[in-house]
Amino acid sequence: MVELSGTGVAIITPFTQTKSIDFDALGNLIDFLIADGVDYIVTLGTTGETPVLKKEEKREVINFTVEKINKRVPVVVGIGGNDTYAVLEEMNQLPIDDAVAILSASPYYNKPSQEGIYQHYKLIAETSHKPIILYNVPARTGRSMSVNTILRLANDFKNIIGIKEASGDMIQCLDILRHKPKEFWVVSGDDDLALAQLACGMIGVISVAANAFPKQFSQMVTSCLKEDFKTARLLNAQLTDAYRLMFEENNPAGIKAFLSEMGLIQNELRLPLVNVTDSLQQRIKQYVINYKK
């Protein structure tokens, strides 16, 4: 049974000024994250701008990431979409043999019923040779997975092993934690709520903020898991302004602005995403200056 506790990072995909994938920057970022203590890396998530990556680019990113990590930490691959059969096709075509699990966001835009969501994941679970992590992110998909749907999937399929819960609904989180099967694990998908959710019983976070602050964020998560909430609160308080800045306009534009100010990547995105506004960039720059003092 795979259990991914602690800090996972939904890693960005860096681009050059010509909008090609910057593999040098990606390699440097991977080394930075591992050196500063993250527990695993999630590639091809939404933060990685996966909707604008071509299929061959996805293959290249997975292969590069796996080779660069070289088994230092586990790798999770994001494969999701609103066409169930296209998701199955990607699962069969992408090089995921070295991944420990697949993170799959619930279908977006076409807003299926709860039964439609269940049947979508049912077919994925019956087809996949890798464990599946559900991903509930209604701010992006337009439809939240209900507690009943999540628990039904958790109970019906042994290879659906956990969920990244990013609904922002603390009551829903508590209900999942209270009623889930013992072996089914729950991680936070909301950096700003992570401390509270870890205190309620989640076993970790798949974080955006940890791209830029891997050491401090990982220490905060580890402190929570050790039930040292005094330390966790102090660490988290130093990052709360960063969370606000990071998600004020768009993710991953916010985290890329932070990483560019830290000298780790070029501040490049692919349309329809654009850089944060100049005023937000200046506030991010000042935060980074102050953080380094």
Image (spheres, rainbow, N blue to C red):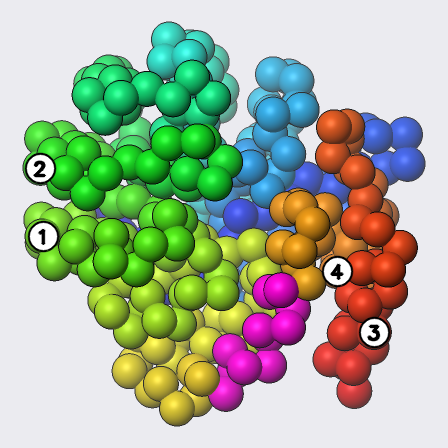
What is the secondary structure assignment of the residue under circle 4?
helix
Examine the rendered structure and indicate whether residue 56 appears above or below residue 229: above
The picture quadrant where one finds residue 59 is top right
Mark 3: which secondary structure?
helix
Kind of element beneath mark 2: helix
Q: Which residue is mark 1?
A: 179
For badge 4, the amino acid type reads Phe
Of the image marks 1 and 2, the number of the one nearer the N terminus: 2
The answer to which of marks 1 and 3 sits earlier in the sequence is 1
Residue 150 rendering spot, x and y as whole percentages: 20, 38
28 relative position to 118: left or right: right
Which mark, by number, is residue 286? 3
Nearest the camera: 4 or 283?
283
Q: Quadrant of residue 6?
A: bottom left
Which one is nearer the viewer's eye here, 64 or 6? 6
Q: Which residues are magenta?
A: 234-244
Residue to which mark 2 is pinned: 155
Q: From mark 1 to mark 3, how far is it between C-alphas?
A: 44 Å
**Helix, strand, or loop for circle 1?**
helix
How many neighbours does mark 2 have within 10 angstroms: few (below 14), some (14-19), or many (20 or more)?
some
* Residue 210 vs residue 66, the one in the foreground: 210
Gap between marks 1 and 4 measured at Cα: 38 Å
Residue under label 4, please give it: 258
Q: CA distance from mark 4 to mark 3?
A: 10 Å
Closer to the chain start, of discs 1 and 4, is 1
Upstream in sequence: badge 2 or badge 3: 2
Q: Main secondary structure of the magenta part?
A: helix
